[in-house]
Image (cartoon, grey):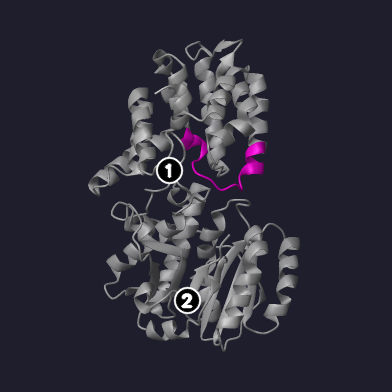
Amino acid sequence: MSAETEFRPNFRSEFLSLIRQDGGPLDLERPDAAEGLARLRDCGTLAARHQLVPAGQEYILGKFKADLRALLVAPQATAERVASRIDERLSAYRYRPSALTFANSLPLLASVYASLAPAANWRVFPSIIRPEILDSAWASVAAYEAAGCAEDLYSQMARAVLHASAGDMGAMIARCRCGASLFNQDPLLAPKPHLHSDLRGAFTVMTPREVVAALSRKAVPPQIQLAAVASTQCRYIVFSCADIRYFDRFHERAIQSFLHNTQEAGYHLHLLSPSAEAAEIARSRLERYTAGGRVGFSHSPDENPGDVAYYTLGRYFVVSQIQSLYERPIFVSDIDQTTRSDCMGLVSKLQGRDLTLALYIKKRPLVAAIPWFLFGAGLLLINNNPHGRLYGEVLNQAALDAFVRAGAVRYNIDQNIIWSTVDYMRQRISSFTLSDLAELGPYPMVTITR
């Protein structure tokens, strides 16, 4: 297959312009090439820190082509300025959702290089692959094989990383093509949106022993500022958390649907606020709801502004405090979910349960290898009983500890930690009860179409 038919024409031409120097291909074997590739790896680290997940390789090239080129060919003094500029650009684009992080895109980019440059040049390529990605790739391959899922897309991509690290570009390209073809994608392009995953984060589940260690470290929860409390007459609480962007986009529809479709419940919204001024503006916008006594509001500083995954974990930094505040069953919900029916019947049926998860009716791929793919993190009911309160405390500490140690949040980490803490509870408390919300009928909430 020719290069013209293998890659989108604009993609290939962009790469040609990026890697050509003085009308000829960039010599990756020259002495300073390894240094340039190391700087390129540092750029990948910046991208990972900023949670940049590009929509495709064209996106990287379109926004960072000149800077990446400069990193490969510039002297060290210039490279420092280029790295600073890339850091600024990553900050500006970190909000964008997409398919693969910059660092995890490197094996895919490598396949394009391999089609345009001599194979001998690839003796220096393994220096691009960061150690944590390589470690995760080995763990991924082992888990997929144990689960009998070796032909899945993620398994193929993990193997592609390993082949690239070993310098076997032919085998790496074959894995990329095989993985892409599984989902009827053009070769070497990103997987479908609903199959997005972060290779680095997918297999970092905390073991019960690590949960115990997290509890012993006693990470300090954020001090929440209470602006309004829902009435104590409410029989259960729907709790959601948002950063300022999600608050602006979704709070009106979420609260209005809740007030329209429930009678005996309270709604508590916690804002991860970038500033005291933003929190005050949000409080004033909620006054018409909080004045009615059924809506509560609190806020705490946003420790990771702009991270599109942060608020999903941030709710578990404060869930135990919300439990203590209301002493009622707590439905943890996404801010972008609307309420379509009253949950009182569910709460009554589930009084004898400690925790209820929303298991997916249609199983997602890789459940055998990744058990937390079995349920959604956007809806769970934690009961107001000793085990439920203990679970909230454990979940609170495990989430805080994971964030403090990682310094960043990745997709699926909330499901990951929920699963880890459930595993911890079930191993230590034989009477801990867990149930599936789907067994009781249609879900009371539905995600808003973005």
> In this view, which residue lies farthest toward the bottom?
233
Residue 230 sits in quarter: bottom right
133 within the magenta span: no
C-alpha span from label 1 to label 2 = 33 Å
Left or right: where does residue 99 sit relative to residue 50? left
Residue 406 visible? The answer is yes
Q: From what the image shows, is residue 261 above or below residue 121?
A: below
Give coordinates of residue 441: x percent, y percent: 38, 78
Q: Amino acid at mark 2?
A: Pro
Residue 387 sits in quarter: bottom left
Left or right: where does residue 53 sit relative to residue 214? right
Give coordinates of residue 162: x percent, y percent: 35, 31
Report the residue marked by disc 1: 200
- Residue at figure coordinates x 42%, y 13% from the top left: 118
> Which numbered tag is attached to residue 19?
none
Secondary structure state at the residue bearing disc 1:
loop
> Which numbered tag is attached to residue 444?
2
Looking at the rendering, the stretch of residues picked out in magenta corresponds to 89-105
Front residue (pair 285, 21): 21
For label 2, count other residues whose C-alpha is less than 10 Å away and answer few (under 14), some (14-19) or many (20+).
some
